[in-house]
Amino acid sequence: MTLEAAADPGAHCTLSRQFTYRLVWRPAKRYVPGVQIELHAQCLRAFLAWTCVSFRMADGDITFRWRTDAPPGERFANRAGVLCRAHLPYGARRGEPVEIELTVIPPVWADNPLVLSVWILDTPNPFNPGEPAPPPEKEPGSDCTLTALAGPVERLAVYCRPMPGPDGTVRAVLLPQDRFGNPSAFEQPVPATLTWEGRERPIRLSGRETLGLPAPAGTGRVTVSVPMDGLSPRENIANGQRAQGRLVVTGNPVWAAGAVPGLRAAFGEMHWHTDLSGDGQRPIEAALAAARDDLNMDFAAPGDHNPAGEAWTRTVQAVESCNEDDAFATFFGWENGGDRGHENYYFTEPDHPLACGGSAGITGGRPAPLIEKLAAVYADRPFLAVPHHTNSEAETRTVDTDTPYWHPYPWATPVAYIRLVEIMQCRGNQERNVYDDAWRGWHQNLHASAQDALALGYKLGFTGGTDNHSGWPGRAFAESEGQDRRPLHGVILTGTWTPRVTRQAVFDSLAARHTWAVWDTRAIVWFTVNGALGGDEIAVAAGTPLRAQIRLSAEDALQTLQIVSEGEPVWSASFADRDVETEADLGPAQRSTHFYLRGLLRNGGILYASPVFVTVGPHGE
């Protein structure tokens, strides 16, 4: 190894703190005076996420330093990830140390290292000035990894499955986190008290704890209280409520088994990227484990960019290894992203024709020219196509023309295989064109929203995804999109009503559009119109009274709860309680339309329940 960090400064995830590394490069051979070296980041995502503040060299002159405030387009143009370039006026001798001081600000997510390497730029040949200089060449063995760990504990997450499993227990995860939601650990075990269904039990918390709790009789919520004097001066539980010298955290709601006969609520996330994407980090295996073990999801599916060949083989192996009936369901997926719309494809068979590089022959391309081919595949082998960030355009712009790298989704004529839309993700809310700030919709007036698609006749259910590129499913962050406009520790998930947590059952429930999307809440949402569950289609005669039923449990009271039809609220209310059970009169059926539910919690959480599609005919036909 010819490049190494001489000392570990103990870097952790941060927004602003700087850490200085003293790197020592020992050349593999002798280099003549005048040679230049470059320090490269080997991963595009790490290059974008780690902020390099300064470079210093005692034996060289820095001739180029990457501007950390460069606009996104310029950042993506530096595909080689060149961080700095230095001229060595006296050359370098084999094995003799050359010191490089590097000061960095690590990213906000853990387990995404910055891997550096040394590249050599040889001097031109003075005897033949017309001879082109050789291209930069990586010095073998010059890899060096800088790692940022989770910061000190500043939160305690309490994540419960929304309903008991077949064994009658509720899987609960108690997870100490840093301020960004990274799994962390207390410096010393902390005594805590867990309360569930009126019963208390002592528990000592260090890192993640996974528990099986008895099924609740009604709607249950775990509380965990921690004495403040049990925390070190560096630790906090900022999401706890202060009570008698303790910090008390309340978990998400849990409904009793049988609350909805024949169905159970399940949460998962299907749009995240790993090191199998050209611009992603973290192994897919670790990502799936985090979805199951840290955020306590019921299901997950990956969405890497064009994972063909060996990448698809690895995807299949990871997905298969984590799939367990009635415990954690996984299925297959990938993202087809281009300059005119992005959509993800999901299916239950690893050899599905639509697998990237599969028998359908689709490995990418703009959505519009693929419609006929995708429709032909769907007629024989069903799949889910889910467009995302439909009402936004790329923050990154081309250097030459200053135009976005990609544009809003090209909604046109509805097609059968698009039954879902990702209504929320790292780039914000995609429901409509104009928002109040509380709804986190920072892309305005691009006319490719979910409401625009519904107006064109698409019959879409709602999902929530993250599109993060750091291999942490469910965690809603990205370094370029929506900075300072969402909580640092935000989580986006998709809820679905399914008979079982198995691969096929969850997939079928998603295909049936029996979904709701949540951001910073795990609200359980039951929304029907005339008995039809959100996502369903019903036919009624003109004049038939329409009535919505809402049953909902959340972590906080509902500041706003609305039923929306054709872009306008037709019913609106606020509630003081966390548990809501109500009905709404929607008037007589007058024309074919749709109704969906949206909610804003007092703590800032957001939810959307899929539309019920109502067809009005003279005899309900």
Image (spheres, rainbow, N blue to C red):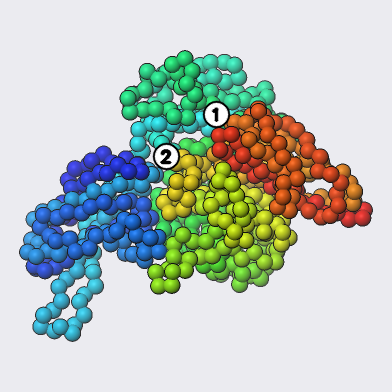
Q: Which residue is mark 1?
A: 251
Q: Is residue 585 visible in the rendered structure shown here?
A: yes
Q: Residues within 10 Å of mark 1 (few under 14, many from 20)?
A: many
| 598 displayed left or right of 153 | right
Q: Position of residue 488 (x, y in %)?
A: 45, 41
- Residue sitting at x 72%, y 44%: 563
- Which badge, 1 or 2, is on the more N-terminal residue? 2
The residue drawn where x is 60% and y is 36% is 601
Mark 2 surroundings: few (<14), some (14-19) or many (≥20) residues within 10 A: many
Q: Quadrant of the N terminus?
A: bottom left
Amino acid type, residue under disc 1 in the picture: Gly
User: Cα distance, mark 1 to mark 2?
Assistant: 18 Å
Q: Position of residue 126 (x, y in %)?
A: 11, 80
Which mark, by number, is residue 303?
A: none
Furthest residue in direction right, as rendered: 619
Label 1, secondary structure: give it: loop
